[in-house]
Amino acid sequence: MELSNNSDKNTPISTQKKRWQENLLPAFWSVGAFLSILLNIILLAVVFSLAKQVFAIKNLVTSDVVGGLYYNFLLMDQATIKTSVTVEDTIPVQFDLPLKQSTVVILSEDTLIEGATVSLNTGGLIIQQAPTDIILPEGTALPIRLDLTVPVDTEIPISITVPVEIPLNETELHEPFVGLQEVVSPFYWMLTEQPSSWPAAKCIYLGIGCP
């Protein structure tokens, strides 16, 4: 009889605990399902929001980033450096200058000529081939003929501006520019071939809405 009484006393507690567990599990699954649905809705909203921007991002990357790099590398290889270079230097000059010409020189002072031969015929006085010393006055013009070689050994200063035009594709920069183009080119053309809008994507991948 005592065992029966103890069993009767514990029965309500066990029943309540079992009922509490039975009520807790459905509530837990209900809350979990609600949170799962809510999280999925948020994720879907984020996905749809990103999907609206995916083509804008793709066009931005294609035209401004990858396309910009590709075309600028192409233009750099086709560019030309144009400038002016000032050259200042001295050039050594060494040569023999032959002089063969007739000219007139002017005496800068009275000049004595010794042992000259003079012929005079004036006032009844005739002198033929008489040796004498004569003085030529300052300012006398003497016609002479030059026939000599003048050695020239000097330095000539120069200062000139030289225009310079250098195509970059004819320099050592051509190879790295072409290499950069080859690195970027596959990504650029891969992005260019992709659709740029949802209608184009549906037409390409699903065959829907094609004109």
Image (spheres, grey):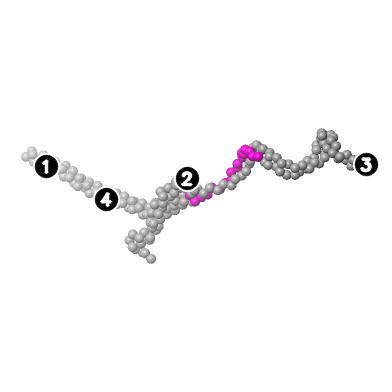
Of residues 25 and 20, the one drawn nearer to the viewer in this rendering: 25
Q: Which residue is mark 4?
A: 33
Q: Which mark is residue 41?
A: none
Residue at 62 percent across and 38 percent down: it is: 92
Secondary structure beneath dot 2 equals: loop
Residue closest to the far right = 123
Which residue is rendered at x = 38% and y = 60% of the image? Answer: 200
Q: Is residue 72 visible?
A: no
Q: Earlier in the sequence, mark 4 or mark 3?
A: 4
Numbered label attached to residue 172: 2
Residue found at the very far left of the displayed protein: 1
Asked if residue 83 lies in the magenta stretch, the reply is yes
Name the residue located 85 percent from the left edge and 37 percent from the top edge: 130
The mark lying in front, picked from 1 and 3, is 3
Cα distance, mark 1 to mark 3? 192 Å
Label of residue 124 in the image: 3
Mark 1 is on which residue type?
Asp
Name the amino acid type tagged 2: Glu
- Which of disc 1 and disc 4 is earlier in sequence? 1
Q: How many residues crowd around disc 3 within 10 Å: few (fewer than 14), some, or many (20 or more)? A: few
Which mark's residue is nearer the viewer, 2 or 3? Answer: 3
In this view, the residue in front, 28 or 175, is 175
Q: Nearer the viewer, residue 182 or 203?
A: 182
Q: Secondary structure at mark 4?
A: helix
